Amino acid sequence: MANAYTSPIPVKQTHLGNALASEWTKIKSVRSTMWTLGIFLLLVVGIGLLAVANTDATDYADMPFTVPAFFGLMLGQICLITLGVLVTSSEYGTGMIRTTFTASPQRYRVLAAKVIIYFAVAFVVSAGSILLVGLAASAAHSGPEAGDLPWAGTVFKGGLYVSLLGVLALAVGSMLRHSAGAITAMLGVVLVPAIMPAFLMIWESTQPLGEKMNDYNAITALAKIFGADTADGTGGGSQLVLLVVVTVAAVAGAFALLEKRDV
């Protein structure tokens, strides 16, 4: 048509990069990120350095220098779980998710961007804090009495494990769309398997279940990754694989529900 209207505003096709930029702006702008990651660093680095100050070289004869970070991660993982939930559920709570989906109608792209940005932030912060504690322990106690065991792998696997827990929390937050409910559910995922074995081991019929829960709960998994528990010699590999499978399943469920429900 000769008189067809042409917008003076340039229009371009959006892509995943635009969604990533949007989610990066969100996660670095909200106070919850500063508080949760700040407390995480305080716990992991603070408790780790305190442990370093109260150990000597002989304590690292059979364990890597990153072991002190394990003590802080036992508590710090709750911070990453909380942040993971808030990345999605907070927008549903405030109603801002409507604005987000209006600006980006491709919902799958929004959720994918949230997962990618959150995982990148969580992994960099967690692996960086573990590395810092490991370097401090190595500088303070490296010597003939210490085993000087390879510990780079614990930095990667430890950061990966707690980051995947956070991604699992993000998926749960997307499915439940309620911050308190999703955080409570994730606390159950972390704490119940760590507590229940003590009760399940009482009865012979439930002992196998108790042993499995004891082997695969988050605390034991981190202990194996950091070499604090070397009973099976796997280094937490099987626990990490299980978490990957569960996280992928949860994220797939979040994507499926995202397209089927109203905002």
Image (cartoon, helix red, strand yellow):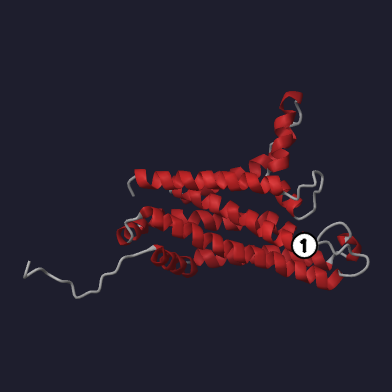
Q: Residue beneath label 1, please?
A: 151
Residue found at the very far bottom of the displayed protein: 8
Side (left or right) of 247 relative to 139: left
Asked whether 159 or 150 is in front, the reply is 150
Q: Residue at x 15, y 71 (%)?
A: 6
Give x and y (percent) for residue 51.
80, 63
Query: Is residue 220 something that shows in the picture?
Result: yes
Q: Residue at x 52, y 60 (%)?
A: 118
- Can residue 36 be seen in the rendering of this structure? no
How many numbered discs, if any? Answer: 1
Q: Secondary structure at mark 1?
A: loop
Instruction: Give how far across and how far down residue 95 sits, in percent.
Output: 35, 56
Residue situated furthest right in the rendering: 144
Most extreme residue toward the top, as rendered?
Answer: 205
Q: Is residue 133 above or below residue 207?
A: below
Which residue occupies 56% across, 65% down?
Answer: 35
Q: 202 left or right of 109?
A: right
152 above or below 216? below
The quadrant the N terminus occupies is bottom left
Q: Position of residue 47 (x, y in %)?
A: 74, 63
Q: Residues within 10 Å of mark 1 (few under 14, many from 20)?
A: some
